[in-house]
Image (cartoon, rainbow, N blue to C red):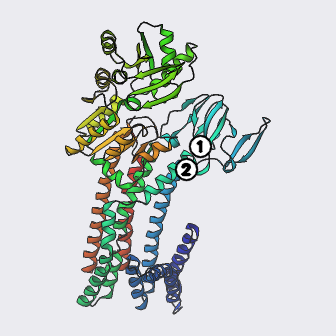
Amino acid sequence: MNSAAFAAWLAAGAILLIGSRLSGLVYPAAIGLPELCAAAGALLLMAPILAMAMRDAFHAELHMSALVAVAVMAAFVRGEFAAAGWISFLMLLAIGVESRAAEGAHASIEALIRIAPQLARRIGPDGTESETPAGALCVGERIRVRPGEIVPSDGVIVEGRTALNEATITGESLPADKEEGAEVFAGTENLTGSVVVEVRRVGADTTLERVRELILSAERTRLPVTRLIDRYIGYYVPAAFMLSVLAWAATGEVQRAIAILVVACPCALVLSTPSAIVAALSAAARAGVLVKNAADLERAGRIDAVVLDKTGTLTTAQLAVERLAPDGVEPSDLLAWAVSAERYSKHPAALALLRLAKEANVAPSEPSDFAEEAGWGVSARVDGAVVLAGRDAWLERHGVSLPAAAVEAAGAGVGLSVVHVARGGRYAGWIGFQDAIRAGAAECLRELSEIGVRRVVMFTGDRQSVAEYVAGKVGCREVAAHCLPQDKVAVVSRIRADGHLVAVVGDGINDAPALASGDFGIAMAAAGSEVAIHSAAIALMNSDLRRIPFLIRLSRAMRSVVFQNLALSTLFMLAGLTLSGVGYLTAIAAAVLHNVGSLAVIVNSARLVRIQPER
């Protein structure tokens, strides 16, 4: 039954009950009319409750619907038609409010992540534009997105520049400037210029749809306390029946037994955890924090150690060449050999070399026998000679002797990451890179300290001087430098062995082993990266590190609300049982108290939706 039909059903039953009361007052001589109206209203309103109870019985399950069904049937059999009707009305109203609250929470999530347009402007081979269903787009096609329109699929801008509102994906309210070569996501809003986008992902493969599926999947997961409630609810229902029978036997008053059955329905208790989970997931989605399991969201509040990678996490990973230090060769030759060897590497240093070579009009040669060892360097044959680019130890491992003066000079470059270069077995010099500190990194570490995170550690594959330079800028006291992938895993393992609950923050790709070794893997800037989204328990869709303390605060707030809800619902239930048992609470009043308890839990959980990152 949809919400409109449900509301109409409730209204019809209520009208009959009100009509029963009014007919008795207006036409007191009309014998039997008030009872007939009350009986009709009661039967109409009892029908959904009895149907739910019969369905549960058919599946050999004993749920709270059985308590209400027995209560209203007892009242009806005793001829208390109005009481049976109003109890049914109030209980159905509670069910409606609970369903509406759940639908509203779901809708708030759907509104964030299901806003892709139905139509797209496809550009044909002849340059003409035509409207086509967004679901009919194919990878490789080109579409035009005009100002004010929503991007219909993931892709790359091939013409034009604009600013996009990416809040639906990243949670970032400030527009993002985009130009040719920039990636765009389905569901984001084009604010200024007209752009042509080459489609890269469509339908269920878009970032928007993947995020949607993961959030809704997280909503279906349960906290340990929920599983505990489910485990014992099967014992609770028979106990409530027994309590009502004892009250009836002790007092001889059926009204008390009916009131106990009504107030004993644990709706508020059952709602305590799911309502808080949905509200917290909605708040996280608004902030661009993708949590794939509700249990992880609950545990995040207990994080007391955070380990962060340097490159791409605390820094922007947008390395720039700061210094060329050739040793007996021309600077242009040093750059040409290095950029040729690094041509097929995706390391930030390689990308910086390619940008500099383009600016300097240095064309890289085509390398052969390219090989890359993560954390060490690359080797390739360039113009007939083997070129090595990487750590000093990498070159020495391949039999290249490094001049002491060059090593000393490279080590003296404060804040510089260094790549040494050799060609044909002879040392050619070194290149220094510098990486910008990410905005908000220092603020993130300060907030982590303020909220009680006891250890914050930075690890990096860079040398000690670079690591200490960056750590000093962001306020990190513990540093692990010269770390290969396996060393990063060892760092995390040692911290866990000290009894800490560890969150590891990285880019989700190069740091995958370290992310997997922590209690929590948090992938940075996961928007558009399927690997990043799936490699960690929690994904930050943007690059704002301040989302990490926000996540911890949200988790703690959710746990607090869950315990408040459990205490509140238990208090309402115990008060209702006590008042019903001593005869101070009628069956209808018990139904009202039941509704008040459920509403209190829902309203308390809704507070979580308003929690947002501090700016």
Q: Which quadrant of the figure has residue 368? A: top right
Q: Which residue is mark 1?
A: 186
Figure quadrant of the N terminus? bottom right
Coordinates of residue 286 in the picture (x, y in percent): 46, 45
Q: Position of residue 601 (x, y in %)?
A: 36, 61
User: Could you tell whether 34 is left or right of 611 in the image?
Assistant: right
Q: Nearer the viewer, residue 391 or 82?
A: 391
Question: In the image as oriented, which residue stretches furthest toward the left?
Answer: 498
Return the disc, 1 or 2, that comes first in the chain's sequence: 1
| Left or right of 321 on screen, residue 513 | left
Tell me the amino acid under the disc marked 2.
Answer: Glu
Regarding residue 435, the answer to whether it shows in the image is no
Picture residue at 22% right of the left edge, 38% below the top:
454
Which residue is at 72% across, 41% downward? 121
Residue at image position (28%, 87%) is 245
Does dot 1 land on a helix, a strand or a loop? loop
Q: Can the viewer see residue 120 in this picture?
A: yes
Residue named by callout 2: 209
- Identify the amino acid type marked 1: Ala
Mark 1 to mark 2: distance in Å?
Answer: 9 Å
Say if mark 1 contacts mark 2, CB within 8 Å. Answer: yes
